[in-house]
Every structure is written in C-alpha cells, then in structure tokens.
Image (spheres, helix red, strand yellow):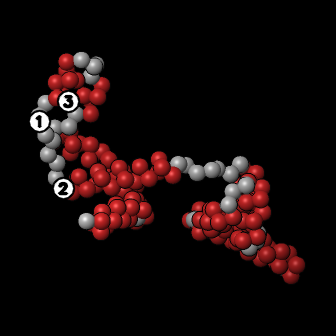
Amino acid sequence: MTVRKKIKKTASKTVLDNARLLEVGRSLAATHARYLAHTLEKSGAKASSLLLPEGDKLFKRYSSTDYVRIPLMEADMTSAILLSLAEESVRGPGKHWPPDIRDAALQGLFDGKKINLLAREISEKTDQPFSSTRRRLQEMKTSDQFKEVKEVEERARARSREASLEDDFG
C-alpha cells in the first residue's frame, strides 16, 4: 500500500517537473488556446456564465446536473496548458537584472569574457547565487538573438579590417 502511494507521488511530481511537457503546454497555449475555447463552448461550457450576476441564473447554471463532454485529446491539451501556466506562477517571473548589470553582462559576453568570471562578478553585485547567474549568462550566450548580434558584429569587424587594408595598400 505504501509503495503505491509513493509511486503516485513520484509520478505526479515527474509530470509537474517534466520540462518537455511544460514546453508543449506553453506551445499549445500560444497556438491552440482559441481552438480549445471554441471546442469547450461547442461542448456546452460557457465562459460568459462567469459574467452573470450572482443570483438565480448563476445558481441554476452551476447547480444543474448537465455535463460537458469533450474529446480526450482536447482534455489532454487543456491539462498540458494548465500545467505550464501553474508552473510559471509557482516559479514566478524571476529576478530581473537592472539595465546596467544586463548591459555589463552582454558586453562581457561580446568581449569573450569567461562565463564563470563574469558570473562571479555579477553574483557579487546582485547577491544572486553564482549558479543562477551562470545559468542565466549561459542562456543569454546561447540565445538566437545573441548569436545574430554576434554575427553582425563579426561581419562589421571583417569589413572594417578589409577597408583598413585597402586604405593601407590600396
């Protein structure tokens, strides 16, 4: 009996901590929210009933024995979306760096500074744990936006070098 309870708790925790599932939920929330709302409305759920004044209409609506039947796929999608929303509200938005710290971090990354050294400097200034700061810097460095800006910067440097060589030997 205790083994079953442990398995259930572990399975539940695994589902909530599964990063891939949370990503699927976020993706579905972005792309299929209207579709799911429409499906639920067609199945009998009425979001507009939440706007009814408290009283007989609302009481009758919620005390009725009518059921809303939705396809299993839509229920799974709704569950994934709700899990991802719940996870975001539990973790919260996180601490944001002030603009001067963020700019210093980006400048350090562009200059090729080692991540560990940069993370130590920033964690001392912000009183955030070194591991969190390092993780955030790593995410910044591997982001598509950073890579694009870095590429543009490298192209500009190459053009500048070519132009200076042409001036010297041209």
Identity of the residue furthest to the left in this view: 65
Q: Are marks 3 and 2 in contact (CB under 8 Å)?
A: no
Seen at 30% across and 65% down, the residue is 2
Residue 118 x/y as whole percent = 75, 66
Secondary structure, mark 3, is: helix
Q: Which residue is mark 1?
A: 66
Instruction: Residue 155: give x, y in percent of width and height.
Output: 69, 71
Residue positioned 20% across, 23% down in the render: 59
Q: Which residue matches tag 2?
A: 72
Residue at numbered disc 3: 62
- First along the sequence among labels 1 and 2: 1
Residue 22 visible in the displayed image: yes
| Residue type, numbered disc 1 | Asp
Res. 167 mark: none
Q: Is residue 31 visible?
A: no
**Above-or-below relation of 137 to 100:** below
Occupied quadrant, residue 72: bottom left
Specify few, some or many for label 2: CA neighbours under 10 Å numbering under 14, 14-19, or 20 or more: few
